[in-house]
Protein backbone atom coordinates (compact mmCIF):
# COMPACT_ATOMS: atom_id res chain seq x y z
CA UNK A 1 0.00 0.00 0.00
CA UNK A 2 1.24 3.48 -0.78
CA UNK A 3 1.86 5.79 2.18
CA UNK A 4 3.22 9.26 2.93
CA UNK A 5 6.73 10.29 3.95
CA UNK A 6 8.67 13.53 3.79
CA UNK A 7 10.38 14.78 0.63
CA UNK A 8 14.09 15.47 0.95
CA UNK A 9 14.75 17.42 -2.23
CA UNK A 10 16.71 20.65 -1.77
CA UNK A 11 16.21 22.43 -5.12
CA UNK A 12 14.72 25.88 -4.58
CA UNK A 13 11.66 26.90 -6.60
CA UNK A 14 11.51 29.93 -8.83
CA UNK A 15 7.88 30.67 -7.92
CA UNK A 16 4.94 29.35 -5.94
CA UNK A 17 3.45 26.24 -7.44
CA UNK A 18 0.14 26.16 -9.24
CA UNK A 19 -2.52 25.03 -6.78
CA UNK A 20 -4.14 21.64 -7.15
CA UNK A 21 -7.46 23.36 -7.84
CA UNK A 22 -6.02 25.63 -10.55
CA UNK A 23 -4.14 22.73 -12.18
CA UNK A 24 -7.31 20.63 -12.00
CA UNK A 25 -9.35 23.37 -13.66
CA UNK A 26 -6.77 23.76 -16.43
CA UNK A 27 -6.55 20.02 -17.09
CA UNK A 28 -10.31 19.51 -17.05
CA UNK A 29 -11.04 22.40 -19.40
CA UNK A 30 -8.96 20.99 -22.26
CA UNK A 31 -9.99 18.57 -24.98
CA UNK A 32 -8.14 15.26 -24.85
CA UNK A 33 -5.90 16.17 -27.78
CA UNK A 34 -4.71 19.30 -25.95
CA UNK A 35 -4.17 17.30 -22.73
CA UNK A 36 -1.91 14.93 -24.66
CA UNK A 37 -0.03 17.75 -26.39
CA UNK A 38 0.64 19.55 -23.11
CA UNK A 39 1.83 16.29 -21.54
CA UNK A 40 4.18 15.77 -24.49
CA UNK A 41 5.48 19.32 -24.09
CA UNK A 42 6.10 18.89 -20.36
CA UNK A 43 7.04 15.21 -19.98
CA UNK A 44 7.97 14.00 -23.45
CA UNK A 45 6.22 11.43 -25.62
CA UNK A 46 8.00 8.42 -24.10
CA UNK A 47 6.83 9.26 -20.58
CA UNK A 48 3.31 9.93 -21.85
CA UNK A 49 3.34 6.53 -23.57
CA UNK A 50 4.39 4.87 -20.32
CA UNK A 51 1.68 6.59 -18.28
CA UNK A 52 -0.88 5.80 -20.98
CA UNK A 53 0.08 2.14 -20.97
CA UNK A 54 1.34 1.89 -24.54
CA UNK A 55 4.71 0.73 -25.76
CA UNK A 56 5.33 3.23 -28.52
CA UNK A 57 5.26 6.97 -28.99
CA UNK A 58 3.42 6.58 -32.30
CA UNK A 59 0.22 5.95 -30.33
CA UNK A 60 0.83 9.12 -28.33
CA UNK A 61 1.22 11.13 -31.53
CA UNK A 62 -2.04 9.62 -32.80
CA UNK A 63 -3.77 10.66 -29.57
CA UNK A 64 -2.42 14.19 -29.92
CA UNK A 65 -3.57 14.35 -33.53
CA UNK A 66 -7.05 13.08 -32.71
CA UNK A 67 -6.57 9.99 -34.90
CA UNK A 68 -6.93 7.62 -31.95
CA UNK A 69 -8.39 7.79 -28.45
CA UNK A 70 -6.30 6.80 -25.42
CA UNK A 71 -7.68 3.90 -23.40
CA UNK A 72 -7.13 5.72 -20.10
CA UNK A 73 -7.77 9.42 -20.77
CA UNK A 74 -8.67 10.04 -17.11
CA UNK A 75 -5.19 8.92 -16.05
CA UNK A 76 -3.56 11.18 -18.63
CA UNK A 77 -5.72 14.13 -17.56
CA UNK A 78 -4.71 13.52 -13.92
CA UNK A 79 -1.06 13.27 -14.99
CA UNK A 80 -1.39 16.68 -16.64
CA UNK A 81 -2.77 18.13 -13.43
CA UNK A 82 0.28 16.79 -11.57
CA UNK A 83 2.71 17.92 -14.27
CA UNK A 84 1.27 21.45 -14.25
CA UNK A 85 1.64 21.69 -10.48
CA UNK A 86 5.26 20.55 -10.56
CA UNK A 87 6.42 22.39 -13.67
CA UNK A 88 5.02 25.64 -12.26
CA UNK A 89 7.72 25.39 -9.58
CA UNK A 90 10.56 25.66 -12.03
CA UNK A 91 10.50 23.91 -15.40
CA UNK A 92 9.36 20.83 -17.29
CA UNK A 93 12.70 19.23 -16.35
CA UNK A 94 11.62 19.17 -12.71
CA UNK A 95 8.31 17.52 -13.63
CA UNK A 96 10.08 14.91 -15.76
CA UNK A 97 12.46 14.12 -12.90
CA UNK A 98 9.55 13.78 -10.46
CA UNK A 99 7.59 11.40 -12.72
CA UNK A 100 10.70 9.23 -13.33
CA UNK A 101 12.23 9.25 -9.87
CA UNK A 102 11.85 6.84 -6.99
CA UNK A 103 9.33 8.48 -4.67
CA UNK A 104 9.33 7.81 -0.92
CA UNK A 105 5.62 8.74 -0.77
CA UNK A 106 4.84 5.92 -3.21
CA UNK A 107 6.83 3.07 -1.67
CA UNK A 108 9.87 4.21 -3.65
CA UNK A 109 8.14 3.58 -6.96
CA UNK A 110 8.32 6.03 -9.86
CA UNK A 111 5.05 7.96 -10.19
CA UNK A 112 4.79 7.26 -13.92
CA UNK A 113 4.85 3.51 -13.19
CA UNK A 114 2.33 3.82 -10.38
CA UNK A 115 -0.03 5.65 -12.76
CA UNK A 116 0.55 3.05 -15.47
CA UNK A 117 0.25 -0.08 -13.33
CA UNK A 118 -2.50 0.66 -10.84
CA UNK A 119 -6.12 1.78 -11.13
CA UNK A 120 -6.49 5.54 -10.77
CA UNK A 121 -9.09 5.19 -8.02
CA UNK A 122 -6.49 3.34 -5.93
CA UNK A 123 -3.55 5.72 -6.47
CA UNK A 124 -5.09 9.13 -7.08
CA UNK A 125 -5.10 10.24 -3.44
CA UNK A 126 -1.59 9.02 -2.55
CA UNK A 127 -0.09 10.38 -5.77
CA UNK A 128 -1.71 13.78 -5.21
CA UNK A 129 -0.43 13.71 -1.62
CA UNK A 130 3.07 13.04 -2.97
CA UNK A 131 2.83 16.01 -5.34
CA UNK A 132 1.48 18.27 -2.62
CA UNK A 133 4.33 17.28 -0.30
CA UNK A 134 6.86 17.89 -3.06
CA UNK A 135 5.47 21.30 -4.03
CA UNK A 136 5.10 22.35 -0.38
CA UNK A 137 8.72 21.43 0.26
CA UNK A 138 9.87 23.45 -2.74
CA UNK A 139 7.70 26.43 -1.82
CA UNK A 140 9.02 26.27 1.75
CA UNK A 141 12.62 26.16 0.51
CA UNK A 142 12.00 29.28 -1.55
CA UNK A 143 10.62 31.19 1.44
CA UNK A 144 13.69 30.35 3.52
CA UNK A 145 16.13 31.94 1.08
Image (spheres, helix red, strand yellow):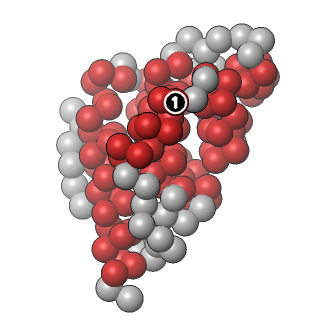
Taking the spot 78% from the left edge, 21% from the top edge, the residue there is: 65
* Location of residue 51 in the rendering, given as x and y in whole percent from the top left corner: 54, 30
Taking the spot 36% from the left edge, 23% from the top edge, the residue there is: 120
* Residue 98 appears left or right of 7: right
Taking the spot 73% from the left edge, 25% from the top edge, the residue there is: 64
Please say if 52 is above or below 104.
above
Q: Quadrant of the C terminus?
A: bottom left
Q: Nearer the viewer, residue 112 or 88?
A: 88
Taking the spot 20% from the left edge, 43% from the top edge, the residue there is: 3
* Location of residue 133 in the rendering, given as x and y in whole percent from the top left corner: 29, 57
* Residue 53 appears left or right of 41: left
Residue 43 found in image quarter: top right
Q: Label 1 crowding class (10 Å Cα cut-off): few <14, some 14-19, many 20+? A: few
Picture mark count:
1
The residue positioned farthest toward the bottom in the image shown: 145
Determine whether the residue tagged by mark 1 lies in a helix, strand or loop: helix
* Location of residue 30 in the rendering, given as x and y in whole percent from the top left corner: 57, 29
Q: Nearer the viewer, residue 14 or 96?
A: 14
Residue 19 visible from this viewpoint: yes
* Location of residue 31 in the rendering, given as x and y in whole percent from the top left corner: 61, 23
Q: Nearer the viewer, residue 57 or 34?
A: 34
Would you name the residue on which mark 1 appears? 29
Residue 112 visible from this viewpoint: no
Please say if 57 is above or below 135.
above
Q: Quadrant of the N terminus?
A: top left
* Residue 57 appears left or right of 13: right
Residue 143 found in image quarter: bottom left
Q: Nearer the viewer, residue 83 or 24?
A: 24
Amino acid sequence: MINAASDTSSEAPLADSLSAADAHNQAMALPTTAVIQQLIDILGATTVATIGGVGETRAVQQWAGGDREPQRPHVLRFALQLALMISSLSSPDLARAWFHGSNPHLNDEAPMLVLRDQPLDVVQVPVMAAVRAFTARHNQSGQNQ
